[in-house]
Structures are given as C-alpha cells and as structure tokens.
C-alpha cells in the first residue's frame, strides 16, 4: 500500500472518529425542542397552581365573610388588582437561639414577591410525637405590619416565634397561614424544619 493511500485512510478514520465524538456532545434538535416544551409546560403548571390557590382562597373567604361583606373583593376587582395569590417560605426559615424565625413571602398571580397586608398564624407540629402541636403564634395585621422587611434584597415578613415548648425530636413541621387583609383570602403552606439540640 502506498504512502498516499495510507494517509487518506488515516484522514478518513480520524474524520469519522471526530464526527462520532462531536455527535455525542452536541444536543440534538429533538432534545432541545423537548426541553423547551417541558419548560413551557412547567411555567403553565405553576401558573395554574397559583390560580387554583387563589380561587380556593377566594371561596373560603366568601364562605366565612359572605358575598355582601366589604372584606371580600369581587372576583373581577380582585383580578384587576395586584393581590395575593399564594405564599412561600424563604430559604432562611429555621431555628435561631430563641426559637423559630419564619421568612414569609406573599406572591402575586405571576409568582412574584408582593407586599401585602394581612394576619399570620404559625403552628409547629412534632410528627414524631403523634402529630402533637408544640407551639402556635398569632399576629394580627397590625402586628404583622411591624414584622415587614423590605430593605436590601429582602422583601418578606420576618416572624420571630420564641419557643413555648421546645420539641423533643430533631424536626418539626411548620404550618404557616396568611390571611390577606384586602381580599380576605386565606393561604397556607407547610415546611419541615430541622431542630438543633
């Protein structure tokens, strides 16, 4: 076999190998399209969850206040305003030296942080002790107003909850309830928090 033919074979093999290797690392257009579709579906699911939570909270508000009460807005007016559609707990929620510190963030219909007036109830349950409620704290709208922190990068209620009875187990389940003062809608969320001895 002459030298020229050998070089041509080497170049062909090297080119074939590099295309195989590059093919392994380059995402296919089908994968890219699938990822975009999944991302769009997740955005839609998140939006539907927020709408469902707001609708359910509105029904609860109407059931407790009645349709003629001024405490509850009409669905049309509530839809036109920036109102609370959900709540979430900030990543700094947890234990400090005196008890718990809750970082509560009201959110609007797009899932964005929202400054909203309302009352806050925090309950701590020890599920290892047959779901026993360890402590509970309540803050009316005026008390909650003093707990708002909108400075720096924080936009949340910072709610101190000193222990009335420290749980025996290493974790508790928090149930945080926020009653929106404008719409009368009630939102709640839960989170497990590790307790250091």
Image (spheres, grey):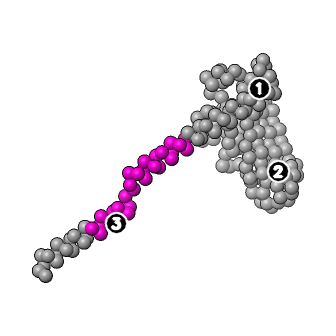
**Marks 2 and 1, how far apart in space?**
29 Å
- What is the C-alpha distance between the residues marked 2 and 3? 55 Å
Q: Mark 3: which secondary structure?
A: helix
Taking depth in this image into account, of 97 and 126 the one nearest to the observer is 126
Instruction: Name the secondary structure under disc 2.
Output: strand
Magenta stretch: residue 176 in it?
Answer: no
**Pointer 3 residue:** 21
Residue at the spot 73% in from the left edge and 32% down from the top edge: 57
Between discs 2 and 3, the one toward the N terminus: 3
Q: Residues within 10 Å of mark 2 (few under 14, many from 20)?
A: many
Q: Which residue is mark 2?
A: 125
Q: Quadrant of residue 129?
A: bottom right
Locate residue 179, reporting x and y percent. 76, 33
Say which residue appears at 61% left-offset and 23% top-offset.
80
**First of labels 3, 1 by sequence position:** 3
Whether residues under marks 3 and 1 lie with C-beta atoms below 8 angstroms apart, the answer is no
Spot occupied by residue 160 in the image (x, y as percentages of width and height): 78, 44
Q: Which residues are magenta?
A: 16-43
Q: In the image, 7: left or right of 120?
A: left
Say whether marks 2 and 1 touch (CB < 8 Å): no
Q: Main secondary structure of the magenta part?
A: helix
Q: CA distance from mark 3 to mark 1?
A: 63 Å
Q: How many tags in the picture?
A: 3
């Amino acid at each position: 076999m002459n030298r020229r033919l050998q070089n041509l074979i080497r170049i062909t093999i090297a080119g074939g190998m590099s295309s195989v290797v590059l093919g392994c690392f380059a995402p296919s257009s089908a994968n890219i399209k699938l990822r975009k579709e999944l991302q769009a579906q997740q955005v839609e699911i998140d939006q539907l969850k927020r709408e469902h939570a707001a609708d359910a909270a509105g029904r609860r508000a109407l059931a407790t206040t009645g349709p003629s009460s001024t405490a509850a807005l009409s669905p049309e007016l509530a839809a036109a305003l920036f109102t609370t559609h959900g709540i979430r707990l900030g990543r700094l929620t947890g234990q400090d030296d005196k008890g718990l510190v809750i970082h509560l963030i009201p959110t609007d219909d797009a899932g964005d942080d929202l400054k909203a007036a309302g009352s806050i109830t925090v309950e701590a349950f020890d599920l290892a002790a047959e779901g026993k409620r360890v402590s509970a704290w309540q803050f009316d709208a005026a008390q909650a107003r003093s707990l708002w922190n909108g400075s720096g990068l924080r936009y949340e209620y910072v709610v101190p909850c000193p222990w009335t009875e420290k749980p025996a187990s290493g974790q508790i389940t928090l149930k945080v309830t926020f009653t929106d003062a404008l719409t009368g809608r009630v939102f709640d969320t839960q989170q497990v928090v590790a307790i250091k001895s």
